[in-house]
Image (tube, rainbow, N blue to C red):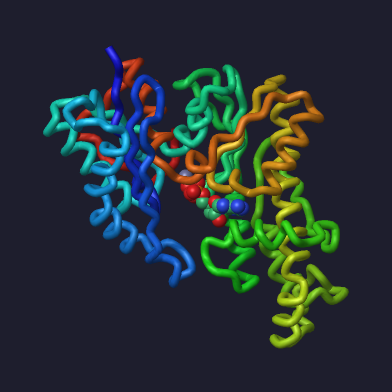
Amino acid sequence: MSICILAIESSCDETSASICVDGKILSNNIANQTVHEQFGGVVPELASRAHMQNIVPVVDIALQKAGCDITAVDAIAFTQAPGLIGSLLVGTQFAKSLALALDKPLIAVHHMQAHVLANLIPDNRPSFPFLCLTVSGGHTQIVRCDGPAQLKVIGETIDDAAGEAFDKTAKMLGLPYPGGPLIDKHAALGDATRFKFPEPQIPGLNFSFSGLKTSILYFLKNAGTSNLFKEEFLADEETRQKFITENMNDICASVQDRIISILLNKLKKAAAETGITHICLAGGVSANSGLRKAFAALGEKENWKTFIPAFEYCTDNAAMIAITGYYKFLEKDFTELSVSPSARSEW
Ligand code: KG4
Ligand code: ZN
């Protein structure tokens, strides 16, 4: 008998539904919310309202694309945590109602665990144990994965996430939200050796990006004068703007290069400490072309087998919830209908 999972993801600003049969993804339908662009970041209430509008058509289209009737669904999986609480409430309530109406089990999925398990979607997948560097707008983690239900965070950011470092840099450069993809584009045309940003000295496998953010702020305020990283603010506004416009590609390339070296140095350390050689990337920032290239090059040098999910499974999506739900179904790891979502990240 085959197992059909309907999964729903609504933790932030993407409404998504996916159908997975026996561990194969048949559809992964994602509605992006463009309403936030004008505000330079996700506005929680607008996100909840957009989820309310999107969720029924998004689920309908996921079923249609998979050629699947709702009555064939064996369980409903949904993102229970972490995320924006108003956004999570919409997906959770919808999933609960559907499970009740269809009289099928409900499966609660942790969004960050699902980002890691997105690596189990393709046929070419890592074997256990593997390490995963999960880099998204809200999280930066190194996770050790000994099985679909055995995941442990062994390193994480103590302040900003890598995606935030990209997005906040973009904002300082006057680029629209989300700035990560734009920095990537500019960086591809720039000289990464032109400006040197400091690397934080954080013990163990943890990350920090707030010092980098401050150094970029001062660097831009001083418009590349000799007092690069000091709070002196020698340049006037016109000079600063001119400096940014004329050096956009090199600034983006240099910042991106530093973010990548912070990430990969810790990943290298984690691999050396654990002796694990199957290494994965996950999360929205793994779409970054510089990171992908540097990750592959490091993997070759260190003799790792490296894995990166397809782009649509890196950014927020319900297919990763579906694959996690599938493994939970095999373990009969079901959830009570009284479950409520949590904004917090504890595993
Ligand atoms: O995983 P994700 O889709 O959502 C969260 O759960 O946060 O990640 C979104 C983050 C944003 O910070 C966005 O700027 C970043 O991923 N991002 C990128 C690129 N594409 C998306 N950052 C750098 N380069 C990219 N190409
Ligand atoms: Zn995410």
Hey, which residue is sitting farthest left in the picture? Answer: 101
Quadrant of the image occupied by residue 248: bottom right
Q: Is residue 106 visible?
A: yes
- Using the image, determine if residue 259 lies above or below residue 123: below
Quadrant of the image occupied by residue 279: top right
**Residue at image location 59% in from the left, 57% down from the top:** 181
**Residue at image location 71% in from the left, 27% down from the top:** 271
Q: Is residue 160 visible?
A: no
- Using the image, determine if residue 42 lies above or below residue 219: above
Measured as percent of width and height from the top left, residue 207 is found at 66, 45
| Quadrant housing the C terminus | top left
Q: Nearer the viewer, residue 180 or 203?
A: 180
Left or right of residue 320, residue 311 in this image: right
Q: How many marks?
A: 0
Measured as percent of width and height from the top left, residue 154 is found at 60, 31
Q: Nearer the viewer, residue 196 or 76?
A: 76
- Using the image, determine if residue 149 lies above or below residue 159: above
**Residue at image location 31% in from the left, 33% down from the top:** 66
Hey, which residue is sitting farthest top in the picture? Answer: 1
**Residue at image location 23% in from the left, 38% down from the top:** 95
Measured as percent of width and height from the top left, residue 127 is found at 58, 18
Q: Nearer the viewer, residue 318 or 106?
A: 318
| Quadrant housing the N terminus | top left
Measured as percent of width and height from the top left, residue 71 is found at 16, 28
Hey, which residue is sitting farthest right in the picture? Answer: 226
Left or right of residue 170, residue 63 in this image: left
